[in-house]
Image (cartoon, rainbow, N blue to C red):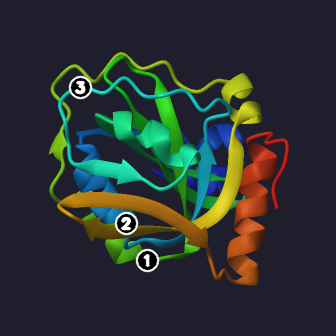
C-alpha cells in the first residue's frame, strides 16, 4: 500500500523498471512524425551500414547517419524513471530485431508531436519482435547528437534531414545526463 513511500528519496536505479511498448511503424510514418518533434537526442549507429530494404516506401535521407532509419519496421517506445528523473525514448528496430537508432525525448521536444508519432502506429503483432537490445558496445560506438529532424516532400518522396537544434540549458543538461548514464564516449 505504501510502496512508493518506502522508496521515496532512495537513489536507486533499480527501483523503477522500464516499460516498453512495441509498435509496427513504416519508415514513411516515422519520417513524417520525426519532422515535427523539435530538439531530441539522436544516437546514430557507430557504423554506417546500408539497411536491408524490403518493399519500397518512397523515403529518402539527406545524410549517411540517417540511412539506417530506412530499414525501420518497428519502434520500441520505452519509459522509465531514473535517479535523474523520467526518461522516454524510442528504439528504431529492423525486421531482424537489430536496433538502427535511438531517439530520446528532451525537455525541448514537442510532447504532443511525440505522442502523435505513435497515433497511426499499430501494436506489433504478438509476440514482439525478437530484439537484440543495444548493448554497451553499441551505445559506446554510437554518435550522440542533439538535433532537429527536418522533413520535406520532393517529387513524391518524403526526405528526412537534420539541422542543429535550438536547445535550452535544461535540455542540454538532460542530454548530458543521458550521455553519462549510457556511457557514451562523446557529446557536444
Q: Is residue 134 visible?
A: yes
- Does residue 18 appear in the picture of this structure? no
**Helix, strand, or loop for circle 1?**
loop
The residue lying toward the viewer, choosing from 159 and 137, is 159
- Label 2 to label 1, Cα distance in Å? 6 Å
Q: Position of residue 97 (x, y in %)?
A: 39, 20
Looking at the rendered structure, the number of numbered marks drawn on it comes to 3
**The image quarter in which residue 96 lies:** top left
Rate crowding at label 3 as few (under 14), some (14 to 19) or many (20 or more) other CA atoms within 10 Å: few
Q: Which residue is mark 1?
A: 110
Image position of 42 (left or right of 177): left
Q: What residue is disc 2 on?
A: 114
Position above or below: 56 against 121 = above
- Name above or below for residue 130 compared with residue 1: above
| Relative height, residue 161 to residue 97 (above, below) | below
Q: Earlier in the sequence, mark 3 or mark 2?
A: 3
Mark nearer the N terminus (3 vs 1): 3
Amino acid at each position: 500500500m505504501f510502496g512508493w513511500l518506502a522508496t521515496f528519496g532512495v537513489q536507486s536505479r533499480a527501483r523503477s523498471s522500464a516499460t516498453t511498448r512495441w509498435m509496427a511503424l513504416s519508415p514513411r510514418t516515422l519520417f513524417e512524425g520525426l519532422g515535427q518533434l523539435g530538439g531530441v537526442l539522436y544516437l546514430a549507429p557507430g557504423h554506417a551500414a546500408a539497411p536491408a530494404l524490403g518493399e519500397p516506401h518512397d523515403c529518402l535521407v539527406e545524410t549517411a547517419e540517417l540511412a539506417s532509419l530506412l530499414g525501420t519496421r518497428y519502434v520500441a517506445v520505452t519509459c522509465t524513471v531514473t535517479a535523474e528523473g523520467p526518461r522516454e525514448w524510442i528504439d528504431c528496430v529492423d525486421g531482424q530485431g537489430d536496433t538502427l537508432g535511438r531517439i530520446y525525448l528532451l525537455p525541448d521536444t514537442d510532447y504532443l508531436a511525440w505522442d502523435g508519432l505513435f497515433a497511426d502506429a499499430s501494436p506489433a503483432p504478438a509476440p514482439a519482435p525478437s530484439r537484440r537490445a543495444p548493448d554497451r558496445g553499441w551505445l559506446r560506438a554510437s554518435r550522440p547528437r542533439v538535433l532537429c529532424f527536418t522533413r520535406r516532400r520532393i517529387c513524391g518522396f518524403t526526405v528526412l534531414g537534420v539541422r542543429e537544434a535550438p536547445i535550452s540549458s535544461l535540455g542540454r543538461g538532460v542530454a548530458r545526463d543521458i550521455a553519462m548514464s549510457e556511457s557514451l564516449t562523446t557529446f557536444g
